[in-house]
Every structure is written in structure tokens, then in C-alpha cells.
Image: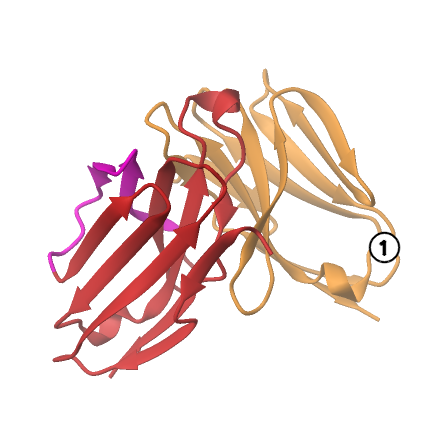
Chain colours: A orange, B red
Amino acid sequence: KNEVEQSPQNLTAQEGEFITINCSYSVGISALHWLQQHPGGGIVSLFMLSSGKKKHGRLIATINIQEKHSSLHITASHPRDSAVYICAVPTAGNQFYFGTGTSLTVIP
Amino acid sequence: ETGVTQTPRHLVMGMTNKKSLKCEQHLGHNAMYWYKQSAKKPLELMFVYNFKEQTENNSVPSRFSPECPNSSHLFLHLHTLQPEDSALYLCASRRRGSGFEAGELFFGEGSRLTVL
């Protein structure tokens, strides 16, 4: 069993829709990371959060430490948001557990 | 542009070839990582270096040989690879530390390796 579980694995949305991606983890953490990977491979860090909520533009990340759950929301989705979104939690040894990713396709 | 540069972006090699992947960062980070990404699988940690010292070798076959000459450069030397080694190889860097203090991971664009 993976220490980090994401859902859904695949998601297709119409442009403009509100999108939610979920991440559950089973280990104790000090921070949780949301990453974005576009076709072609490069990965970009979107958020690092340890409590509450963070917002960057149309992206919002929330975390509930007690429930060991985080969500990534995209408001007014756009085709350029199409990517794989990955949840990651650090281990005590400066490594990471990664989710398998959520593949998002936003259709115009 | 994340500040982490990987070369080459694409590499095709035969099973008897020897090649190297290169990663470079000038972000002042002192933890550097090699990850392997295969289709439909989570990122797989291969090696971790802190201050040029290898701190983790995640049971990686010896046909993969890392080298970290300084805290800004990381290499992955490849020899006698197998077709199942075909994957995207990603380099990442981070400040050394624990938890929130260590900050975010910065990834390179990856090197897409195909072994024939």
C-alpha cells in the first residue's frame, strides 16, 4: 500500500469547471507538497503547506492534519491546466513519498 | 525555468553503451536527488546526496552509478542498461534540512532515456 493515495487517477473537465483533486496520507508529516507535471516531463512545485489553506491565482490547496487529507482545487479551469498533479510528503530522512498522480485534461 | 538544468533531454542508447546524465543547479541547494519515473508509477527515488555525500542508495542496480563532484552538480553514469530501464530520469534539489525548513523541491525537466 502506498503511503500517499490520490484520487481520482484521471479527470476530464470542461473549461471553466471547478476541479478538486484529493490526497490522503498515512504517515506523520511536517509539510505536504503539491506538484504539477506537464507533458514533456518537467515538474514544478505548486504548494508546500503544513496547515490551513494557500492560494496562488486560481489554485487553492487545503490540508487537514488531523484527518491526514489535502485537496487541490482549481477554479475556472483552463486547457493550460491540463497536466499531472502529484501529492508528496517528506520523510524524516529528507526523502519523499509520492502519490501516483492525477492526470487532468481540461477540454475547451 | 526552475533553476535545475538537466542534459541531455533525450537519450537513446544500446545495451552495451556507456552514457551519462547531467544535472546542475545554482540555487544554493545542498540536497540533490535522482528519481526514476516509469509510466503509471509513482516517482521512484534512486539516490540522495547531501553536501556531496551519498546518503541514500535505494537498492539501485550497479549499472547506474551516481557522481556528485560538488553541491551544484550531479551525474548519473549509465552502462550496460536493460530495455526495462527506459524511463524519465528526473533530478531535483532542495535546501538541506527537515520538514518545512527544507523548503520546496525543484525539479529539472528530465532526461527521457530509451534503451534499445
Q: Name the residue under label 1.
A: A17
Q: Position of residue B13 (x, y in %)?
A: 25, 81
Instruction: Please tell me which residue lies in front, A63 or B105.
Output: B105
Q: Quadrant of residue B61?
A: bottom left
Q: Is residue A73 above or below residue A41?
A: above
In the image: residue A31, left or right of residue B40:
right
Q: Quadrant of residue A16?
A: bottom right
In the image: residue B54, left or right of residue A79:
left
Q: Which amino acid does label 1 sit on?
A: Glu
Q: Which residue is drawn at 43% across and 24% down?
A: A27
Q: Where is residue A63 in the image (x, y as percent from the top left)?
A: 65, 26
Q: Position of residue B1 (x, y in %)?
A: 60, 56
In the image: residue A2, left or right of residue B105:
left
SS at circle 1: loop
Instruction: Please tell me which residue lies in front, A92 or B66.
Output: B66
In the image as oriented, which residue stretches furthest toward the top? Answer: A66
In the image: residue A46, left or right of residue B16:
right
| Most frequent secondary structure within the magenta stretch | strand
Magenta includes B56?
Answer: yes
Q: Give the range drawn in magenta.
A: B43-62
- Quadrant where the C terminus of chain B lies? bottom left
Magenta includes A63?
Answer: no
